[in-house]
């Protein structure tokens, strides 16, 4: 395509809906944690899509899985099942608390399925008045109208007409606020075990215990949105495995396909039985190509070598950011866990995280923001140590530019 057409960033504004504001450069090729743009300039990738490319770009195992499946069978309607989907569901069941899997194509779709499931379960078992969903300020659960309404940023859900009802938001990590709104009308709590988009905010272990206890007391289900934290991001296969609190429903997407769109909702048999034939579905959900790639991702990620490697890389990245901060005094803290880290702007740089991201692109390193005050780092789980060092050196130059500007 690009050989016939001269494609430029300027064309974005001519042919695309203006809901995104992409950066000035257009990447065309990636290998591991390095990416090259149209001009041949090289970048270290500390973003990984947005915590998506968990094995970097064009990992040989994923390319192999895609090619092999691509020459066999691409798609079937869900009136038939397929081997890659059965294999991946079996792996997810074997690796987690879950007995049942529903496949979707995106995080929002997996969460939409989870929200419909918890409502249906509560209505079947306890009656239609048990419909309250409790969620948290700053939470992010996707952009469908139900998921964006459960998300905790009104700016994303306002302005589209009447919203889905019976959704209550309370501050994250606030046990008293949660207790105050909980009742037998509560159908479910939906939460990220570590808030990503909201600013890299981890759940306190005590808070998690309280959520679980309140759910049990009031026959409510606990839904963990692990779309960003899942598939090794925090150094465990899923974030819930860090502690004793096990959810009833878990959603996973982003890294599950390593760059190929796929998502899943995991739950127990008892709960799953309430999504009876015809109650929910998706044309592409469980697509053989996506599941073949998902199988390859899990085979690589769910190993002690890769999961322990996340903790080692976390240390390198965290130490590097702390060292940069010691020199330039720009962050108030480095927070998060595993390879989901946030550098929080201090008083002097309030609201200016995006400036660091833009300066970093100029210096040849890709990062992300999580709100206006946090620069977010979500590199590949297998990023080479040398690339971490080089990316940090480039990021330091970017920090120097912003500070000296
Ligand atoms: C990215 C994200 C989503 C939405 O996923 P999409 O694939 O964009 O629909 C939902 N929840 C969390 C926690 C996310 O980080």
Image (cartoon, grey):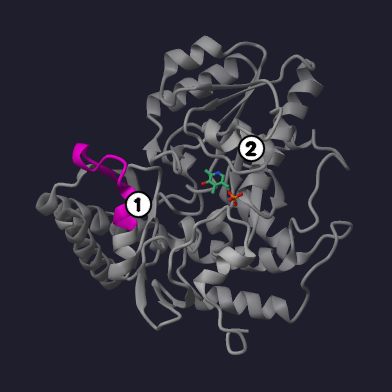
Callouts 1 and 2 close, C-beta under 8 Å: no
**Depth check, front residue: 380 or 305:** 380
Disc 2 within 8 angstroms of ligand 1 (CB): yes
**Depth check, front residue: 215 or 104:** 104
**Mark before the other along the chain sequence, 1 or 2:** 2
Q: How far apart are marks 1 and 2 (CA)?
A: 26 Å
Residue at image position (41%, 57%) is 307
**Depth check, front residue: 91 or 251:** 251
243 vs 148, left or right, is left
Residue 248 in sight from this viewpoint? no
Residue at image position (22%, 54%) is 321
Q: In the rendering, at what x and y percent does residue 323 appear?
A: 14, 54
Q: In which quarter of the image is residue 122?
A: top right
Q: Quadrant of residue 402?
A: bottom left
Q: Residues within 10 Å of mark 2 (few under 14, many from 20)?
A: many
Q: Name the residue under label 1.
A: 354
Residue reaching furthest to the bottom? 3
Q: In the rendering, at what x and y percent does residue 306 appear?
A: 41, 62
355 vs 292, left or right, is left
Residue 314 in sight from this viewpoint? yes
Q: Give the range drawn in magenta.
A: 340-357
Q: Looking at the image, is 399 positioned above or below residue 147?
A: below
**Depth check, front residue: 351 or 374:** 351
Q: Mark 2 points at which residue?
A: 147
On residue 79, which mark appears?
none
276 vs 29, left or right, is right
Q: Residues within 10 Å of mark 1 (few under 14, many from 20)?
A: some
Residue at image position (37%, 29%) is 204
**Viewport quadrant of the C terminus:** bottom left
Residue at image position (56%, 73%) is 62
Q: Looking at the image, is 283 positioned above or below residue 227?
A: below
**Viewport quadrant of the N terminus:** bottom right
């Amino acid at each position: 395509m690009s050989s016939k057409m001269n494609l430029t960033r300027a064309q974005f504004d001519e042919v695309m809906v203006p809901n995104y504001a992409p950066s000035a450069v257009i990447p065309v090729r990636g290998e591991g944690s390095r990416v090259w743009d149209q001009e041949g300039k090289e970048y270290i990738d500390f973003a990984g899509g947005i915590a998506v490319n968990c094995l970097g770009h064009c990992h040989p195992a994923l390319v192999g899985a895609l090619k092999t499946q691509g020459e066999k069978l691409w798609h079937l309607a869900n009136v038939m099942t397929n081997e890659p989907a059965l294999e991946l569901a079996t792996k997810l069941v074997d690796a987690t608390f879950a007995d049942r899997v529903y496949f979707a194509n995106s995080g929002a779709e997996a969460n939409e399925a989870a929200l419909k499931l918890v409502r249906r379960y509560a209505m079947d078992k306890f009656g239609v008045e048990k419909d309250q969903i409790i969620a948290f300020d700053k939470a992010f659960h996707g952009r469908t109208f139900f998921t964006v309404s459960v998300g905790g940023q009104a700016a994303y859900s306002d302005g589209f007409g009447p919203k889905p009802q019976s959704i209550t938001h309370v501050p994250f990590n606030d046990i008293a606020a949660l207790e105050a709104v909980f009742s037998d009308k509560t159908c479910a709590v939906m939460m990220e075990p570590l808030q990503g988009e909201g600013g890299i905010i981890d759940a306190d272990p005590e808070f998690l215990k309280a959520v679980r206890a309140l759910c049990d007391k009031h026959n409510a289900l606990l839904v963990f949105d692990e779309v960003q934290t899942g598939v090794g991001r925090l150094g465990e296969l899923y974030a819930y495995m860090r502690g004793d609190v096990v959810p009833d429903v878990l959603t996973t997407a982003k890294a599950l396909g390593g760059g190929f769109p796929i998502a899943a909702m995991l739950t127990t048999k008892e709960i799953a039985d309430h999504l009876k034939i015809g109650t929910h579905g998706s044309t592409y959900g469980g697509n053989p190509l996506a599941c073949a790639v998902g199988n390859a991702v899990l085979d690589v990620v769910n190993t002690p070598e890769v999961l322990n490697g996340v903790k080692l890389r976390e240390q390198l990245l965290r130490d590097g950011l702390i060292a940069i901060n010691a020199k330039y005094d720009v962050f108030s803290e480095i927070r998060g866990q595993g390879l989901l880290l946030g550098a929080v702007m201090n008083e002097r740089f309030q609201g200016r995280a995006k400036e660091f991201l833009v300066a970093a692109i100029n210096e040849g390193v890709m990062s992300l923001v999580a709100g206006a005050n946090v620069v977010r780092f979500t590199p590949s789980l297998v990023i080479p140590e040398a690339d971490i060092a080089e990316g940090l050196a480039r990021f330091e130059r970017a920090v120097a530019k912003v500070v000296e500007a």
